[in-house]
Amino acid sequence: MSWYHLAGKDLISTKDWTKEELEIVLKVTEELKALYYAGVPHHTLKDKTFLMLFFNPSTRTRLSFETAMTQLGGHAQYITGADLRLSLEDKPGAGETVKDTAKVMSRYAHGIGIRLLEDKVSRWGEDTEILYKFAEFADIPVINMASNSWHPCQGLTDIYTIREKLASDLKGVRYTIMWAYSPWARSLGSVQEEMLVAARFGLEVVVAHPKGYELEPEALALAKRYAEGSGGKFEVTSDLDDALKGATIVFPRGWMSLRRYEIGKEAEIKNAEKFKDWKYTRQRQKELGKPGYLMHVMPIDRGHEADPEICDDPELSWMYDQAENRLHVQKAILSLTMGGRPS
Ligand code: CP
């Protein structure tokens, strides 16, 4: 397979792409990052437009995609859900349909990015269904810019960052993804995508959470299957100290329970308070017997999810490198899906 075969592809989750396709993204990222630092222009998407539809706020995703399109010689247009007359309910009188919105967007632009999560939907799965619906009706690639269940650009960025830091052979590298207390009640997208990608690329993935914070069954089954296929490992535990033992990398992140839409946001936040001791502390880092590099997709809830001292430790914290790599990885994703040679 050559890179130009990815033209026109949607990216809702990395699970929809083959490992070979994901490897192409990482390879092209490497090339584009080298050109960027060599000061060589790389206008792979000259005069093309990427429409970014945000239903929820963002720092990294918005800024990195917009910058990416500028560096690729194109343009990114920022739109919020409130700017359109779009209704996500498909019924007379509700508003413009997803179908008509996607069809019209396809007449102006060459790619669509969508962020839809947390309070903007009323149940688990609704966001993903809407993203696939956009993808069905759009004639141009649809890129998930974070949904409740998946965050493919983040997952790809993080495996790129891990390889950049530790080299390509990740055998025996233990990666602990731990639930951490935060009152922010966030989606599962980053955690689930991270888990899938890490298992697929051969890491020893451990997911640790208090009882009640189980991830989606589909994601867990896939992670298990990927680990079996890659020679990695996959384990879920509610014993945090055990999960941290021997961890080369730690990702502390609060996430909502699967009961969130039944019990409501306030109850969800209240329940999480029972687990305030779930935090990546300096003491825990010292005891784990391996570096325990901090990975975090950000925004990080400093003082809740991790000690600020760990966040600011230049030897331990990778989070700003992750944030930068969003730019380089997304330039690859945009170039491959919006450029190339349609089949
Ligand atoms: N990691 C991430 O998606 O950050 P933003 O929410 O700021 O875009």
Image (cartoon, helix red, strand yellow):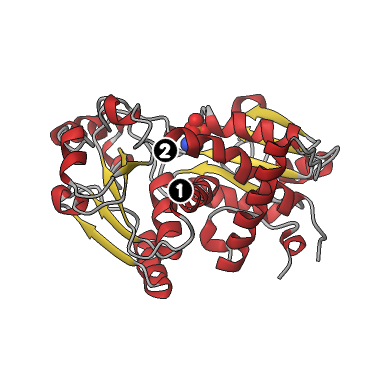
Label 1 amino acid? Answer: Lys
Q: CA distance from mark 1 to mark 2?
A: 9 Å
Residue nearer the viewer, 85 or 154: 154
Residue nearer the viewer, 254 or 235: 235
In percent of width and height, residue 188 lies at 38, 45
Q: Is residue 82 left or right of residue 147?
A: right
Which residue is disc 2 drawn over?
318
Secondary structure under tag 1 reads helix
**Can the viewer see residue 133 in this picture?**
yes
- The residue carrying pointer 1 sits among few (fewer than 14), some (14 to 19) or many (20 or more) residues within 10 Å by Cα, namely few
In percent of width and height, residue 235 lies at 26, 62
Nearer the observer, disc 1 or disc 2? 1
C-beta proximity under 8 Å, tags 1 and 2: yes
Quarter location, residue 21? bottom right
Secondary structure under tag 2 reads loop
Residue drawn at x 73%, y 38% as measured from the top left: 50
Which residue is disc 1 drawn over?
165
In this rendering, the answer to whether 235 lies above or below 84 is below
Distance from mark 1 CB to nearest ligand 1 atom below 8 Å: no
